[in-house]
Image (spheres, rainbow, N blue to C red):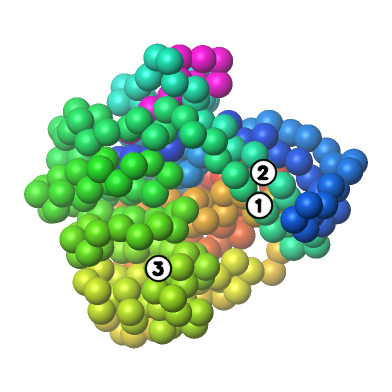
Amino acid sequence: MKSEYRPRIVVIGSSNTDLVVQCARLPRPGETQPGGNFARYAGGKGANQAVAAARAGARVAFVGAHGDDAFGREAKAGLRREGVHTVHFRPYPGEPSGIALILVGGRSRENLIAVAKSANDRLSGADVLAAETLIAKSDAVLCQLEIPEEPVEVAAALAQRYGVPFLLNPAPARRFSARLLRQVHILIPNASEAEALTGLSDPKAAARALLGKGCGQIAITLGARGALVCDDAGFTQIPAPRVKPVDTVGAGDCFAAWLTVGIAEGMTLLQASTRAVRAASIAVTRPGAQAGMPRREEL
């Protein structure tokens, strides 16, 4: 890769405003945890990944939907400040913008997240087709599952048509078509998502099952244990640097984005995943999903 070249990434996905409460520990069902600090951050898996990819040095276009409200206008303004192309981040009048309620607690700063129905659920295949020219000229396309399956399937088909690597972060985990899985160049679940998709708790066994169903390669994030990748050389576990976590929200999005940028730059899966683990390890030391994403020079 020429040092001056900035890869083109198209991210198709969700945008939310994260309403976050910090807890001494995560509450059990029916339990109230008082006294937590409250904060509001820009979030949503798609928007998080767009910001992370932009900070990683890519030229990023975001395809998504927001409501015609203050949350949506602030989300779009925030992406623009990060240099993200937002022409295809369109408003849906009458629909609320995305909201996520997040609890962060315990020594490991793990999280619980609930996402409300919103304009994200209205994103359509036609919205993705409108960005076909951008996809055709891109170096990689990245999607998640916080949007309906139709736009994800259209994005995968367009990426395949133009020979562009298609990466899928299957979060939140849900069943999707075998055809879509076969179009995935690299699947990027975490361990619980890999288990939900396969019924197998062992990450290696889950990876084998997913590869057997037709996806090209796989990188499973393992939290503080780093990541497990499978390429032509077999399985490799990448350890994560030891850090003191502050907020793990957005760590998986950071990994997925940096992995995608690495692939777009011509790195191998192992090379791109190793750098992505380092980036995610920085992200967890800071509060906020988008706010905590590291910049390229920090690595």
| Amino acid identity at mark 1 | Leu
Q: Quadrant of the N terminus?
A: bottom left
Along the line of sight, which residue is nearer the eye, 152 or 276?
152
Q: Provide the residue span drawn in magenta.
A: 63-72
Q: Residues within 10 Å of mark 3 (few under 14, many from 20)?
A: some
Between marks 3 and 2, how big is the CA–CA gap? 24 Å
From the viewer's perspective, is 243 left or right of 236? right
Between marks 2 and 1, how big is the CA–CA gap? 6 Å
Seen at 45% across and 54% down, the residue is 171
Q: Residue furthest front?
A: 30
Residue ID for mark 2: 102
Tell me: residue 183, above or below residue 161.
below
Q: Would residue 67 be counted in the magenta stretch? A: yes
Picture coordinates of residue 131, whole percent (x, y): 21, 31
Q: Nearer the viewer, mark 3 or mark 2?
A: 3
| Amino acid identity at mark 3 | Leu
Is residue 89 among what the camera can see?
A: yes
Seen at 43% across and 15% down, the residue is 94
Q: Which label sits on residue 211?
A: none
Picture coordinates of residue 280, whole percent (x, y): 56, 57
Sequence order check: which comes first, mark 2 or mark 1?
2
* Labels 3 and 2 touching (C-beta < 8 A): no
Along the line of sight, which residue is nearer the eye, 72 or 58?
72
Residue ID for mark 3: 197
Between marks 1 and 3, how big is the CA–CA gap? 20 Å
* Labels 2 and 1 touching (C-beta < 8 A): yes
Sequence order check: which comes first, mark 1 or mark 3?
1
Q: Quadrant of residue 67?
A: top left
Along the line of sight, which residue is nearer the eye, 58 or 25?
25
Is residue 229 among what the camera can see?
A: no
Residue ID for mark 1: 112
Seen at 44% across and 63% down, the residue is 189
